[in-house]
Amino acid sequence: MNAADERRRTGRRHLLIAAVIVVVAITQYAGLKDAVRDFDHGFRDGVGGR
């Protein structure tokens, strides 16, 4: 009984950690995509402006 409760609690904690990691990965990926797009536009503007 106690071992089963402990296992359930650990599983829930792992699910929570996995969910946090997924959310962080998605936000980091979105931020990276925006940064790459901004850099690309800035690079083109800089090269085209010369």
Image (cartoon, rainbow, N blue to C red):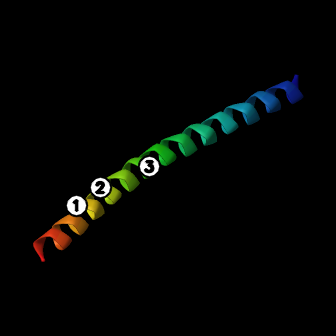
Give the residue displayed 38% in from the left and 47% down from the top: 30
Count neighbours of disc 2 (C-alpha within 10 A) and say few if under 14, some if 14 to 19, many if 20 or more.
few
- For disc 3, the marked residue is 29
- For disc 2, the marked residue is 37
Q: Amino acid at mark 2?
A: Arg
* Labels 2 & 1 near each other (Cβ < 8 A): yes
Q: Nearer the viewer, residue 40 or 34?
A: 40
Taking the image as shown, residue 12 lies to the left or right of residue 43, namely right
Taking the image as shown, residue 42 lies to the left or right of residue 34, namely left
Earlier residue among tags 2 and 3: 3
Furthest toward the bottom, the residue is 50
Earlier residue among tags 3 and 1: 3
Q: Which mark's residue is nearer the viewer, 2 or 3?
A: 2
How far apart marks 3 and 1 lie (CA) works out to 18 Å
Q: Quadrant of residue 38?
A: bottom left
Q: Amino acid at mark 3?
A: Tyr
Q: Secondary structure at mark 1?
A: helix
Q: Amino acid at mark 1?
A: His
From the viewer's perspective, is residue 50 above or below residue 45? below
Give the residue displayed 80% in from the left and 27% down from the top: 5
Q: Quadrant of residue 40?
A: bottom left
How far apart marks 2 and 3 lie (CA) works out to 12 Å
- For disc 1, the marked residue is 41
Q: Nearer the viewer, residue 46 or 19?
A: 46
Residue 37 rendering spot, x and y as whole percentages: 29, 55
From the viewer's perspective, is residue 19 above or below residue 5? below
Q: Nearer the viewer, residue 17 or 34?
A: 34
Taking the image as shown, residue 47 lies to the left or right of residue 19, namely left
